[in-house]
Amino acid sequence: MTHFPLNNANQRSPRVQLNGSVAAAVMAEGGQRARAKIQSISVNGGLLQLQHELSIGDFVEIAFHTRAGAIHGMAEMLQPTRKFQSACLQPFRFIALGDDDHRKLRMALDTALDRSFLDPVSEQLQTPPGF
């Protein structure tokens, strides 16, 4: 069964900042392919760094790998947020994910959010001298 992410206008989904550490393959409707780097991601979508912007409203397939496994979904490209000489940052929103892909994405996000939440705390929670 396919999962269709729903936006809750009252609460924004937690995002994980990847800063380009995860590569993604993007395929547009006409078969045009692009390589991208994921800057940030949530269960509803994310931000890609692309060499060339894609048309706003284009429906694309996005595939990338996580520790939880490969994820493949359909997405809609949104208005680019920044343009540089050799790249652009362009957000997307997921419009359809298979149940397995949705589960793997949630697992990967939960793991990353747990790690980013606990890491700064664990550095501060050191055993005081004398214990």
Image (tube, grey):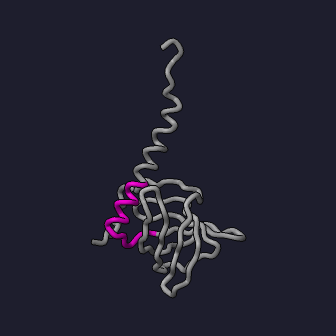
Q: Residue at x 51, y 87 (%)?
A: 30
Q: Nearer the viewer, residue 12 or 5?
A: 5
Q: Residue at x 40, y 56 (%)?
A: 13
Q: Nearer the viewer, residue 67 or 102?
A: 67
Answer with left or right where residue 110 lies relative to residue 89.
left
Q: Nearer the viewer, residue 72 or 90?
A: 72
Q: Position of residue 111 (x, y in %)?
A: 42, 49
Reply yes or no: does residue 94 show up in magenta. yes
Q: Position of residue 44 (x, y in %)?
A: 41, 64
| Residue that protrudes farthest toward the top in the picture | 130
Answer with left or right where residue 15 lies relative to residue 4.
right
Check the image and report above or below for 119 versus 106: above
Which residues lie in the magenta part?
93-108
- What is the magenta segment's predominant secondary structure? helix
Count of numbered circles in the view:
0
Reply yes or no: does residue 99 show up in magenta. yes
